[in-house]
Amino acid sequence: MTSDKCSWCGKKAVFFRKYEGKYLCKYHFCQSIEKKVRRVVRKHRMIHPGDRICVAVSGGKDSSVVLYLLHQIVKNRRDIRLFAVSIDEGIEGYRPESLKMAESLCKKLGIEHHVYTFKEMFGEELDSRMKKVRADDSLQIKESCTYCGVGRRYAMNKFSRVLGATKLATGHNLDDEAQAVLLNYIRGDLFRASRMGPDTDRGANGKKDSMFVSRIKPLREIPEREVGLYALLKGLEVHQTECPYASGIRFEARDFLNHLEDKYPGIKFSILETFEKIIPYIRQFAQKEIGDLVLCRKCGEPSSHEVCKTCELWDEK
Ligand code: SF4
């Protein structure tokens, strides 16, 4: 918060946008977020007539804001259906509370809401899985976010497809996208890198794949801090507690990028812009290295290997 005046109307500013050098009052801040999101949706042609958009909601600020804004954008479109899906990974003291908030927002907006659990999908919750993983020295992958993220992406794709979605909207913001660019580069994960970008219904070969529901990320150009402030100013009740498993390289990448952004405002935007320029080449290269997607021998879901990562991580009990 700041005591300066809005650069547009002179009213009391609530935010200083360092990368633009502008002070913004509540009205102009919210208006700028809404305009930007509409522009991103238009620019990347994220919504088409007849779409059935499934929004992945967790009750956190990002997914609540994306649900709220998409509802604003399509509420008068009779040809477009919006519904929400949540995944309960089984994280005690964290997920039940956040799912209550997701449920309450969906109710307020009159949006149909489905919840699926790791327990019903994999026969086990994340908490009990991680206890076993930590006790088993033969397992190389130990990071809870890997088990959680792989399982969640799998579940969201599968259930949104089963529910008839033509688009899967997620709350990924600019910070998430910049972190993912950096992490995929560090890990040399070309498959994941080739599936980033605004048109994420493609395999490593750049072709559309019917087993993947097209993912759209309307907040991909909004910095995380601004998503949080928008939620606050709009009075959205969001879950603020950090996940008890939140640690590991992603969080170090987050701190590193925040440090850079502080010193060099706008750096997260330039990471994303540069990545968008080179993504066609990454896809070409990934196609040569990885080839076409196949269906996982165990579960039948799309995979870059004979057995998909989800079956590899969640079946090795
Ligand atoms: Fe899952 Fe990690 Fe996010 Fe927690 S911090 S919800 S374990 S991805």
Image (tube, grey):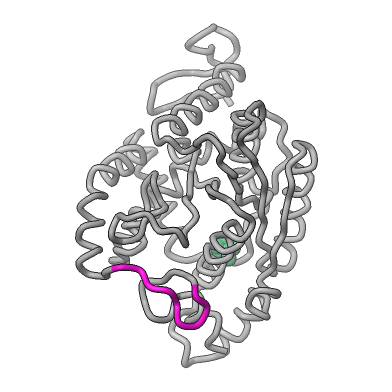
Residue at the limit of the structure toward the top, as seen here: 10
Residue 138 place in picture, x, y as percent: 47, 92
Residue 292 position (above or below residue 225)? below
* Magenta residues, start to end: 292-300
Q: Nearer the viewer, residue 262 or 137?
A: 137
Where does ligand 1 appear, by image quarter? bottom right
Examine the residues drawn in magenta and state their main secondary structure.
loop
Q: Quadrant of the C terminus?
A: bottom right
Residue 92 place in picture, x, y as percent: 73, 68
Q: Quadrant of the N terminus?
A: top right
Q: Quadrant of residue 269?
A: top left
Residue at x 53%, y 15% (from the top left corner): 4
In this picture, residue 75 sits left or right of residue 283: right
Residue 14 position (above or below residue 150)? above
Q: How many callouts does the rendering have? A: 0
Q: Nearer the viewer, residue 241 or 73?
A: 73
Residue 149 place in picture, x, y as percent: 52, 65
Residue at x 54%, y 91% (from the top left corner): 136
**Residue 294 falls inside the magenta stretch:** yes
Residue 71 position (above or below residue 123)? above
Q: Quadrant of residue 306?
A: bottom left
Residue at x 66%, y 54% (from the top left corner): 85
Q: Nearer the viewer, residue 237 or 276?
A: 276
In this picture, residue 282 sits left or right of residue 162: left
Residue 173 place in picture, x, y as percent: 48, 43
